Image: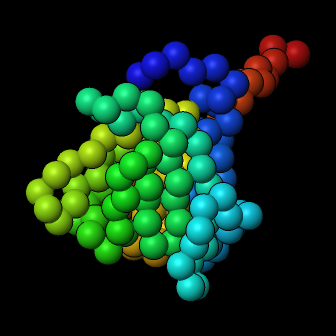
Amino acid sequence: MSFYDPGQLMAGFRSMSMLAGLVERGGRPAAVTPTIPLRSGEKQYGWFPVDVTGAGRRLAVVTSERLILGDEEFRLRSVTSLRPRPGDFALVLDVRDGRSVEVVGPWVPWLGVVLCAELHGAAWPPGYAPVIPAPRRRRELVDTHR
């Protein structure tokens, strides 16, 4: 993965965690103001740079019907599986034509949750358990020697 600002990595991971919680409670991703022409009924959820393995940095645009990576467009109904690796900020999409596309970047874990919400109505693809580290809490020491 190319160098990314640590603040972006934290923001992307935190956004993934919050969106995953919302989707698990029955919520849906929120649409944003479109930056591309949309089809009738289509909603845009976001756009950001990603690294596409073997192809370099691309602008990713995610909608309710498509994932656009630079010049390539993937209809969500052609995606056969998603393999997220949130700890690596990576997601592999398998598509019907037999290709696999791997994207990496600070907002890719969030992208994975958006795609899973659209494809599966869940925060994670079938068979994947979320691996989100719990917030660290300071242990309070209890003085038992009074």
What is the x, y in percent for residue 17?
Answer: 60, 48
Which residue ends up furthest to the bottom in the rendered image? 40
- In the image, what residue occupies the spot 74% across and 64% down? 33
Residue nearest the viewer, comparing 141 with 4: 4
Residue 4 lies in quadrant: top right
* 10 to 48, vertically: above or below: above
Which residue ends up furthest to the left in the rendered image? 98
Which residue ends up furthest to the right in the rendered image? 146
Residue 12 lies in quadrant: top right
- In the image, what residue occupies the spot 57% across and 73% down? 38
* 98 to 38, vertically: above or below: above
- In the image, what residue occupies the spot 58% across and 43% down? 48
On the question of residue 97 being in view, the answer is yes
Quarter holding the C terminus is top right
What is the x, y in percent for residue 126?
Answer: 30, 65
Residue nearest the viewer, comparing 111 with 15: 111
